Image: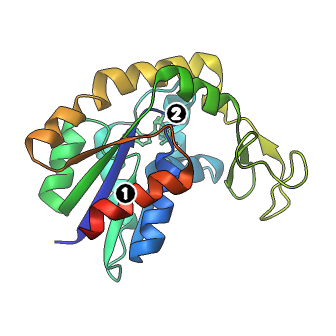
Amino acid sequence: MKKSYAFIGIQGSGKGTQAVLLAEALEYQHINIGDLLRYNVKNKTLLGAKVQSIIRKGELVPDDLVFEVIENKVSLLSKGVVFDGFPRTINQAEHLLRQFDLLRVFFLDLTEESAIERISARRVCQDCGENYNLNTQPPQIENVCDRCGGKLAIRSDDRPESIHRRFEEFYQQTSPLRYFFESHRLLSVIPAAGTIEEISRQILGLIMV
Ligand code: AMP
């Protein structure tokens, strides 16, 4: 079975950033389910058509579609996988344990207040999907992507109506995973209020011991 790590945490807790850094450090494949789903919406695939309104409302996509996305994305050649935004339900967590050699789950712990603060500063490139934070990682030119020159925008599901629903989904479906993985002795809770570098150092430190 392929080795894997997973990140869970409230929206805005920095899962995406930390998952990329860990994947780079370990030379693992990085799989961000939200990005893959948005890619399908943007490119008007069959899957995109099925999930578009679900994502816009801030609800969770059905598990079978999420499993399909993962199955199609995992590379046979990769040494391992860092999952970002997966699992989000107990059923997904059980699937992960069945299909992968799960080495550790990082729960990035952030208050709802700080999460709202970060999300309101979040901007994403409409062309390449690169993420920015107006306070901590602003683009060099206002509203223009450093990487591809595309236009930056607020993610449609970061608007207040959807964000409220996404928080609700997090509390109801995802936060119980903390206890699920704790009981499997796979959980590390990481306070997520620090800087990107501090948190990354802490995660790498836990892996290297
Ligand atoms: P994210 O970019 O991780 O916040 O994900 C954006 C949206 O994609 C979520 O609000 C869900 O609608 C959907 N999504 C992402 N990951 C999952 C997952 N593991 N299970 C179900 N839906 C997901």
Rendering coords of residue 191 (x, y %): 40, 39
Marking on residue 55:
2
Is 108 situated above or below 43? Answer: above
Instruction: Please tell me which residue is depicted at 44% across the width and 60% down the height of the picture.
Output: 201
Label 2, ligand 1: CB separation under 8 Å: yes
Rendering coords of residue 46 (x, y %): 50, 49
Is 160 situated above or below 201? Answer: above
**In terms of secondary structure, where does tag 2 sit?**
helix
Left or right of 139? Residue 165 is: left
- The residue lying toward the viewer, choosing from 63 and 159, is 159
- Kind of residue sitting beneath label 1: Ile
Q: Which residue is mark 1?
A: 203
Rendering coords of residue 30 (x, y %): 44, 64
Q: Earlier in the sequence, mark 2 or mark 1?
A: 2
Instruction: Please tell me which residue is depicted at 54% across the width and 28% down the height of the picture.
Output: 115
Q: Residues within 10 Å of mark 1 (few under 14, many from 20)?
A: some
- The residue lying toward the viewer, choosing from 110 and 163, is 110
| Residue reaching furthest to the right | 141
On the question of residue 139 being in view, the answer is: yes
Instruction: Please tell me which residue is depicted at 48% across the width and 72% down the height of the picture.
Output: 24
